[in-house]
Image (cartoon, rainbow, N blue to C red):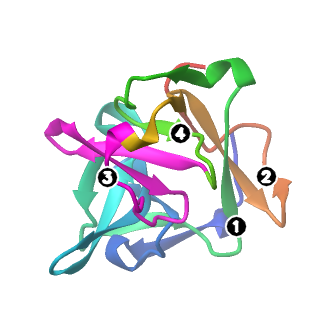
Amino acid sequence: MSFPVQAFVKEKVSNVPQGALVLVRGFWSIRTRFDTPNGPKQNIVFLNGEVAGNIHVAPDDYGIAVSRDYSVEFRVASSADIQRNGEPPQGVSIVIASDSPEVWGHIAGAPEHRYGFKLNGDPLENEEEHDNHPFYKAGAFKAWLMKDGKQVGAEPLFTVGAQ
């Protein structure tokens, strides 16, 4: 698989725009935020590898971000990969919601503390899991590099789960 080097920039993870993808310590993540009583907290949700689903504070370290001239599109292999059930997302999942897709993860080291974010990195307004039932979710998906609405390359940037 090959991609144009112009599609990537070195940037401090804490400065990567919310909703953008960034390669951190060898794993892809999406920049998100939590709204806390002490103000917003900048976070990342890891999307692949053994850390998939972990939510961490955005490190004050460098990563490789997808350039602002490019974007990423998440795709499932088929509609059969979108499962409907009452169980909350486990690990990292894409959830199909009423207004826009969401990515769900959990606090690192505490998988019982699950949170969802819109793909622009905003936290979900409603954090109560039971208010989101039933869940339509996909635990396996691919991230495709895009430029001006067109796919870049014949292979995905990375794959999440088994497909």
* Helix, strand or loop for disc 3: loop
Amino acid type, mark 1: Tyr
Q: Residue at x 35, y 37 (%)?
A: 130
Query: Could you tell me which quadrant the N terminus lies in?
Result: top right
Labels 4, 2: front one:
4
Residue carrying label 2? 152
The picture quadrant where one finds residue 110 is top left
Q: Earlier in the sequence, mark 4 or mark 2?
A: 4
Q: Is residue 109 left or right of residue 1?
A: left
Tag 4 and tag 3, C-beta contact below 8 Å: no
Badge number at residue 95: 4
Tag 2 and tag 1, C-beta contact below 8 Å: yes
CA gap, disc 2 to disc 1? 9 Å
Using the image, determine if residue 100 lies above or below residue 122: above
Residue carrying label 3? 25
Residue carrying label 1? 70
